[in-house]
Amino acid sequence: MKLTPSKINTFNIFKLPAVFFMGVRVKSIDNIACIVTVKHRWLNQNPFKSLFWAVQGMAAELTTGAIVMAKIQESGKKVSMLVTTNNATFTKKATGRITFVCNDGELIDNALKRTIETGEGQTIWMKSVGTNKDGVVVSTFNFEWSIKAKQ
């Protein structure tokens, strides 16, 4: 079963309700990229009337994690996944609709192949960039994912 935006968004209703109620939505996903949007609104704002950093983090992490999940599912193997480290840079006030994009799908292929072959854990750094409607970067998140084949 291939992961689609509607399947991921439905999963979020039941398994990650905070993501769903904050308005984080997957718009597209393929082997290389995932696009997630979130709109600044009263429920997800900070005291400075912009998108709360943690909501931006939810959207950014989802762009990377959805690709990892899809690749693991595609492999047909049991593989665990976990964020082990992350960092972020905020460059502009996030208002309006913010679009997060991760284009690092190809990075996962080699690490997934290695962990399945060797059983050893692998790590991958993936980047998600958030832009506003004008294409201006508002934040950049980096996530280190650890994957390991289950025995």
Image (spheres, grey):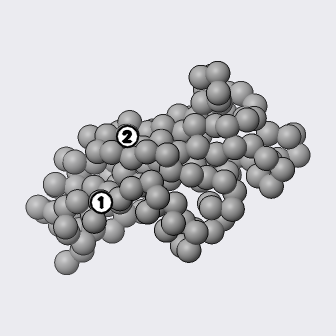
- The residue under label 1 is 2
- Res 122 seen here: no
Residue drawn at x 69%, y 57% as measured from the top left = 22
**Place of residue 87 in the rendered image (x, y in percent of width and height, measured from the top left):** 56, 43
Task: Determine whether 38 is above or below 118 in the image.
Answer: above
- How crowded pointer 2 is (Cα within 10 Å; few <14, some 14-19, many 20+) is rated as some
Residue 123 vertical placement versus 136 (above, below) = below
In the picture, the quarter occupied by the N terminus is bottom left
Kindly identify which residue carries mark 2: 33
- Of the two numbered discs 2 and 1 on the same chain, state the one appearing first in sequence: 1
Residue type (three-letter) at the residue carrying disc 1: Lys
Residue 16 is left or right of residue 144, and the answer is right
Q: Residue 10 appears at what percent x and percent y?
A: 51, 66
User: For this rendering, which residue is in front, 111 or 130?
Assistant: 130
86 or 56: nearer the viewer: 56
Q: CA distance from mark 2 to mark 1?
A: 15 Å
- Give coordinates of residue 25: x percent, y percent: 56, 52
Q: Mark 2 belongs to which amino acid?
A: Ala
Characterize the local packing of mark 1: few (<14), some (14-19) or many (20 or more) Cα atoms within 10 angstroms: few
Q: Secondary structure at mark 2?
A: loop
Position of the C terminus, as image quadrant, is: bottom left
Please identify the residue farthest to the right as the structure is shown. 47
Query: Residue at left 11%, top 61%?
Result: 117
| Residue positioned 69% across, 43% down in the render | 39
Image-based side of 57 in relation to 66, left or right: right
Q: Residue furthest bottom?
A: 151
| Residue 5 appears left or right of 129 | left
Q: Residue at x 49, y 68 (%)?
A: 11
Please say whether residue 101 is visible from this viewpoint: yes
Closer to the eye: label 2 or 1: 1
The residue closer to the viewer here, 38 or 124, is 38
